[in-house]
């Protein structure tokens, strides 16, 4: 039995993905401990979730810092003290600078509501509908220095329904997120996922463009 994963979670908002990770741990499905939750936004509901579950939490507000470098440095120093296995971005709406990324190689994981590399950034559901895409989805990836970029671990695809409203699509994508994020973290915990030269290997198979998961 491999050891528990120790995680830090960074978030900016509601924190439903964070909640899905907590729920999975509490059900005994994901063998992990969340050592710290950090938000850049003091009003993030995710911080309330952390309090409710007695998880160490703090706000490091980017507006209190002169520039990105100094913000990232404080974040980095705080995270180093926790020495976690992975830094999990769960709706953390800030770009992390290259020094931060290089300090935690292959240890930062992100979830994004699109089939990357399509639609990095914001308003992904809206863009899918505007472009009349037939499919949409969610992607989990290792974070590199770009925006929502880096080696893709896994994704789930869904068909966009005819005449689908943005709010409906968003809800469906959220459900997929809440499934795939804890699932992939538990595969890390089980030692099934590794990154070799920026290539993702899951259960002895290399996945150039990530592995497709099904719910
Ligand atoms: C999620 O949809 C997540 O994929 C997205 O923010 C939302 C956070 O929701 N992340 C990004 O867009 C990263 N580029 P949550 O706070 O309810 O977990």
Image (cartoon, grey):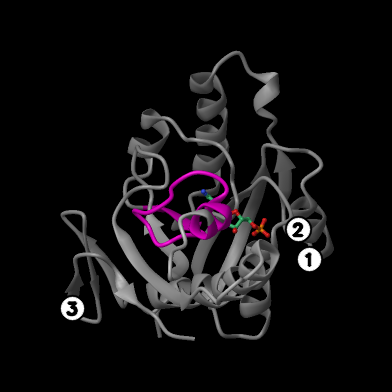
Residue on which the image places disc 2? 50
Callout 3–callout 2 Cβ contact below 8 Å: no
194 relative to 109 in the view: left or right = left
Q: CA separation, marks 1 and 3?
A: 37 Å
Callout 1–callout 2 Cβ contact below 8 Å: yes
Decide: is 77 above or below 200.
above
Element type where label 3 sits in the image: strand
Q: Which mark is residue 134?
A: none
- Most foreground residue, 3 or 201: 201
Decide: is 135 above or below 94.
below
Q: Position of residue 41 (x, y in %)?
A: 73, 38
Element type where label 1 sits in the image: loop
Q: Quadrant of ligand 1?
A: bottom right
Ligand 1: does it lie within 8 Å of the C-beta at label 2? Answer: no
Q: Name the residue at 82% across, 55% down.
A: 48
Single out the mark in the foreground, 1 or 3. Answer: 3
Figure quadrant of residue 26: bottom right
Q: Residues within 10 Å of mark 3 (few under 14, many from 20)?
A: few
Q: Which mark is residue 53?
A: 1
Decide: is 77 above or below 207.
above
């Amino acid at each position: 039995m491999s050891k528990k994963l120790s995680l830090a979670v960074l978030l900016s908002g509601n924190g439903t993905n964070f909640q899905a990770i907590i729920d999975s741990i509490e059900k005994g499905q994901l063998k992990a401990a969340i050592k710290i939750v950090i938000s850049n936004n003091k009003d993030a509901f995710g911080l309330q979730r952390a309090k409710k579950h007695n998880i160490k939490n703090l706000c490091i507000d980017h507006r209190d810092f002169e520039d990105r470098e100094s913000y990232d440095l404080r974040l980095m120093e705080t995270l180093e003290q926790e020495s976690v296995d992975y830094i999990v971005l769960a709706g953390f709406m800030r770009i992390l600078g290259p020094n931060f990324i290089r300090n935690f190689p292959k240890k930062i994981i992100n979830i994004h509501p699109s089939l990357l590399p399509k639609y990095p950034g914001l308003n992904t559901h809206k863009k899918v509908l505007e472009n009349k895409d037939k499919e949409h989805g969610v992607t989990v990836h290792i974070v590199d220095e770009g925006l929502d970029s880096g080696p893709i671990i896994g994704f789930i695809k869904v068909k966009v329904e005819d005449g689908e409203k943005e709010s409906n699509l968003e809800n469906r994508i959220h459900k997929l997120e809440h499934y795939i994020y804890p699932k992939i973290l538990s595969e890390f915990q089980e030692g099934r996922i590794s990154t070799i030269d920026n290539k993702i290997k899951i259960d002895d198979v290399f996945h150039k463009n990530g592995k497709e998961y099904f719910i």
